[in-house]
Amino acid sequence: MLPKEPALTTRQRLAGDRHRPRYHFQPPSNWMNDPNGLIQWNGQYHLFYQHNPNGPLWADMHWGHAVSDDLLHWTDLPVALAPTPGGPDEAGVFSGCAVNNNGVPTLIYTGTRGEHNEIQTQCIASSDDALLTWRKYPGNPVLDRMPDEAGQTRDFRDPFVWQDGDTWYMALGSRIQDVGGAVFLYRSPDLIHWEYLNPLLVGDIHRHGVTWECPNFFKLGDQWVLIISSHMGNYTASVLYFAGSYENHRFTPRCEGVLDYGTLYAPLTLLDDRERRILFGWLREDRPAEAQKAAGWSGVQSIPRVLSLDAHNRLNTAPIPELATLRGRHYHYGPQDGAALAVSGLALDIVAAFETTAAGLCGISVACSGDGRKRTDIVYDVATQRLAVRKITPELFDITTTQARDVPHPLAAGEPLQLRILLDGSVVEIIANGRTSLTSRIYPLPTDGDHVQVIGAPALQSLDIWEMSSIWHL
Ligand code: DQQ
């Protein structure tokens, strides 16, 4: 086996890749998926993540680990959890969370066994050296039995744990056979002995999908919010939220919505010491496995987002304000200035507002080739109230059959369209009016230009664009 390349050298080697983000977190190389174990410890933020340290495709799940003072700049730390041969996680250390157990940092995760990871049980591990190394509890698994009402024994994973008084609660992702995705609720006095209470919520198989993964359950303002990731078989509406009340271990949702319509999946939240509920999500790739293998990396974490509920109890997401510290050169355009922009770049933070009083299209094109033929349009149709991301790559797609994702974004009468666009190589995070999220990936990026253009310039109210600096010192 070749000696392991230092993380920084790996990052330097891959830094010239035009598709690779500059200000979003990624491991030095290889595969990453779900964020795991988010926790603030002694003021620092710890991010763990599903990781295959040996290749750029999903396999052999470990927990990678990085630490940050500001949620933006990260230091790579050694892999935190690896499968233990012969143990309950021998086939993979799947997703989970982290808690402070009376001063002891503790990870709660799903261990898998079997050729298809079909034996799923819940395990714990703790650290006594400030989260650097982890000791698995010798009595693992601490929870190996699904409720009988599930009617199946395969899908039982991704513990999300919180404390209320002296009692720990765990929400587990699962499903009820032929009924739909489900989250099961457990409680424990010590993180070791778990008692099943009842389903926290059961979905409708047709509307909410077959299996629910990666639940998050927390109080936000005066509501309780449940977030789940659902296998819908495509990238549309697969991360859902429910908001409502929670009493006597029963959750009663009063409204539901889509957290992201695009490539963001398996998000995990933490409550930080400023009482902010902060969400990270895995931004999936949108290109074939061969291309991921050739690149040597796969998977990106979203910019952390602060969650809130608006007056209609819709879940709003906003990139953390700390992101402004990465902003460099600034361009501002007013209502008359949108026709020709002198901006280009693949690492940009864009804030735009458009009037929506007259029918028409408005939005922003990014990653435009010199001749404007290849580009990615983020475009709103005022008449249909739909927001689309449309990738126009004439050599791959006929200009009339572009690759598009098109989602509802209703605006109140007279409400302007507000777009926040975080472009970073192949990543484009799009948030409209704080409440419609449509993350996307742009593959391939044109090689002959990376210009920005306005769509529907007469409707432009204001446009601010910042060039963003890299979070890595390479
Ligand atoms: N990813 C993990 C599972 C989880 C899924 C495995 C969601 O624990 O259900 O890598 O992306």
Image: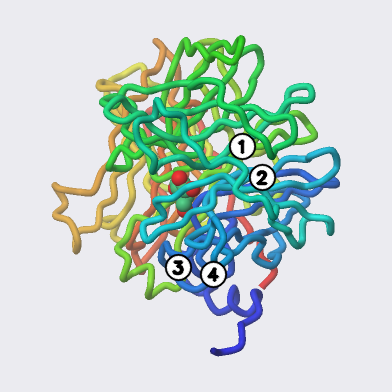
- Amino acid type, callout 3: Arg
Q: Residues within 10 Å of mark 2 (few under 14, many from 20)?
A: many
- Mark nearer the N terminus (3 vs 4): 3
Q: Residues within 10 Å of mark 3 (few under 14, many from 20)?
A: some
Q: CA distance from mark 2 to mark 4?
A: 19 Å
Per the image, the residue denoted by label 1 is 269
Give the Cα distance between marks 4 and 1.
Answer: 24 Å
| N-terminal-most mark, 2 or 4 | 2
Q: Is residue 425 above or below residue 175?
A: below
Q: CA distance from mark 3 to mark 4?
A: 22 Å
Q: Are marks 2 and 4 in contact (CB under 8 Å)?
A: no
Rendered residue at 42%/72% (across/down)? 295
Camera sees residue 36: yes
User: Tag 1: residue type?
Assistant: Thr
Image quadrant where residue 308 sits: top right
Total labels: the figure holds: 4
Ligand 1 within 8 angstroms of badge 3 C-beta: no
Q: Secondary structure at mark 3?
A: loop
Give, as a three-letter code, the residue at label 2.
Answer: Leu
Find out whether the residues at labels 1 and 2 contact each other: C-beta distance under 8 Å.
Answer: yes
Residue located beneath label 2 in the image:
38
First of labels 4, 1 by sequence position: 4
Please name whichever residue, 286 or 60, is drawn nearer the observer in this view of the structure: 60
Residue 53, numbered circle: 4
Number of other residues with Cα within 10 Å of mark 4, as a class: few under 14, some 14 to 19, many 20 or more: many
- The answer to whether mark 2 and mark 3 are in CB contact below 8 A is no
| Residue 18 marker | 3
